Image (cartoon, rainbow, N blue to C red):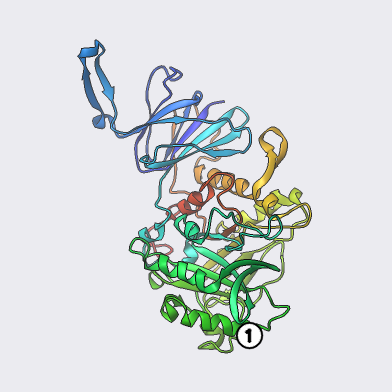
């Protein structure tokens, strides 16, 4: 079976495997198109440009004659997919692409070439008119849960909050308890050591830095000590620390609606999973930011709630029976990112949690990361890896050619602007299975499926 190279950049890219498998010819892969090759070898070369961009070097001194060089040549090594269904290929820092290798069948693979986006400031490139419901924002579930392995920990110690923000995380899941009158990060009964004021300091520094002041963050705040602290006391503590913390009131968007990106650049959108009737907040629940009217516990098929003129579709099925439910979890949590089938008359916002846990056969690290060598039938592929494969398959497909059958060698097929995937997505251990593998795919969705005049684009 032939392999496929899919170019989802705006560049014309030349492919050369150097092995003569393509009769010594360079293959041109046009922007937003795919091309089949006999077989992608262990090593190949990719370079930018067009025939006019090629340069020549005179090497008469070495009796080699004149040799053709390219201005931007990148040597790539493919990998054996023994463990996971996809991998990120290692490239020089100056390379303008991210390249993913996916396994289609046992002896067939696809190379997917995507633009390298600036993850630390990708929102600054997008129009002000975009509603936050028409973005795909990566998030971390239990953002500050770095301690309590393997039950309570949900993020690596190597990815503290500043690293998460620079990595493209834009939705934070902050869970707090009141300890001696101050708010401290907690996950269940496990203290996570970070004071709320420390979290706010990091957020304020990020949103006021010259390179990231046009970004925005969504912060979900949830009470963890409801069994010992009354909701009213917790709500008052959040209010006081927000108003008196770094950035003060001006750093926050506290209206109970989904704003546009231009309204909240340099600010935090509050997503309040606390507060009951909003007592103590200006405007009551209207001054608590986005405020869910209901949140059923671990609803498998998801639920909806209204937020002014937006319908919020939510998937938060976390109490899965065991790791055997990982495939079903992935199917439900990814499908919600697709456009709603009933074409509702008002905008929709999709919120999905890729995280899940159960004791003892589905602890957070097991669900998110999987275990063993699933590629050879020894182990189970985790949620994160499966979500990455789903994103790669979805981004790399051609909607107009899905039923056209196999393509002959060398035949081109034009890729449309891509699928429309939108929503806010929360992950555990987000850098696994490969560092920054899934997050760039989620970010890339913001540049796909756009049509002028729609979604504020």
For the N terminus, the quadrant is: top right
Residue 66: x and y in percent read: 23, 17
- 190 to 417, vertically: above or below: below
Residue 343 image-quadrant placement = bottom right
Q: In the visual, does 341 lie left or right of 321?
A: left
Residue reaching furthest to the top? 63
Answer above or below: position of 187 versus 450. below
Question: Which secondary structure lies at badge 1?
Answer: helix
Q: Is residue 255 visible?
A: no
Q: From this viewpoint, is residue 152 visible?
A: yes
Position of the C terminus by quadrant: bottom left
* Residue 298 shown left or right of residue 61 in the figure: right
Number of on-image labels = 1
In percent of width and height, residue 346 lies at 52, 71
Q: Say above or below: 422 vs 22.
A: below
Compared with 262, 383 (above or below) is above
167, 410: nearer the viewer: 167
Image quadrant of residue 18? top left
Of 83 and 420, the residue lying toward us: 83
Residue 375 in the image: x percent, y percent? 66, 35
**Residue 78 in picture, x, y percent from top left:** 50, 30
* Residue that appears at 49% across and 62% down: 170
The residue shown at (51%, 53%) is 442
- Residue under label 1: 233
How packed mark 1 is, by other alpha carbons closer than 10 Å (few <14, some 14-19, many 20 or more), is: few
Residue 389: name its quadrant: top right
Identify the residue shown where x is 57% and y is 82%. Answer: 237
């Amino acid at each position: 079976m032939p392999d496929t190279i899919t170019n989802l950049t705006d560049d014309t890219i030349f492919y050369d495997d150097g092995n003569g498998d393509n009769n010594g010819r360079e293959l041109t892969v046009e922007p937003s198109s795919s091309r089949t090759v006999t077989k992608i070898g262990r090593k190949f070369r990719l370079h930018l440009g067009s025939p006019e961009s090629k340069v020549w070097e005179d090497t008469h001194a070495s009796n080699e004659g004149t040799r053709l060089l390219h201005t931007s040549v990148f040597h790539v090594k493919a990998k054996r997919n023994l463990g996971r269904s996809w991998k990120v290929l290692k490239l020089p820092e100056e390379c303008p692409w991210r390249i993913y290798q996916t396994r289609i069948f046992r002896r067939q693979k696809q190379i997917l070439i995507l633009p390298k986006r600036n993850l630390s400031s990708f929102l600054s490139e997008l129009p002000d008119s975009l509603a936050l419901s028409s973005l795909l924002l990566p998030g971390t579930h239990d953002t500050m849960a770095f301690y309590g392995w393997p039950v309570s920990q949900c993020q690596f110690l190597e990815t503290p909050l500043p690293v998460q923000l620079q990595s493209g995380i834009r939705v934070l899941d902050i869970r707090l308890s009141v300890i001696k009158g101050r708010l401290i990060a907690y996950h269940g009964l496990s203290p996570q050591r970070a004071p709320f004021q420390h979290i706010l300091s990091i957020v304020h520094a990020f949103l006021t830095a010259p390179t990231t002041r046009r970004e925005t963050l969504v912060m979900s705040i949830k009470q963890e000590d409801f069994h010992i602290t009354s909701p009213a006391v917790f709500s008052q503590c959040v209010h006081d620390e927000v108003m008196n913390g770094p950035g003060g009131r001006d750093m926050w968007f506290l209206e109970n609606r989904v704003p546009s990106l231009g309204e909240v650049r340099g600010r935090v959108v509050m997503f309040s999973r606390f507060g009951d009737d909003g007592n103590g907040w200006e405007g009551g629940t209207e001054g608590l930011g986005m405020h869910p009217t209901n949140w059923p516990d671990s609803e498998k098929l998801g639920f909806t709630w209204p937020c002014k003129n937006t319908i919020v579709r939510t998937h938060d099925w976390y109490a899965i029976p065991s790791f055997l439910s990982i495939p079903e979890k992935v199917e439900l949590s990814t499908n919600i990112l697709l456009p709603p089938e009933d074409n509702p008359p008002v905008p929709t916002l999709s919120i999905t949690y890729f995280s899940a846990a159960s004791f003892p056969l589905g602890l957070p690290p097991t669900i998110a990361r999987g275990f063993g060598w699933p590629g050879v039938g020894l182990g189970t592929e985790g949620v994160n890896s499966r979500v990455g494969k789903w994103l790669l398959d979805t981004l790399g497909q051609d909607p107009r050619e899905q039923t056209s059958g196999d393509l002959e060698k060398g035949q081109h097929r034009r890729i449309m602007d891509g699928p429309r995937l939108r929503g806010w997505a929360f992950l555990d251990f987000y850098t696994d299975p490969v560092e920054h593998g899934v997050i760039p795919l989620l970010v890339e969705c913001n540049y796909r499926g756009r049509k002028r005049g729609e979604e504020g684009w």
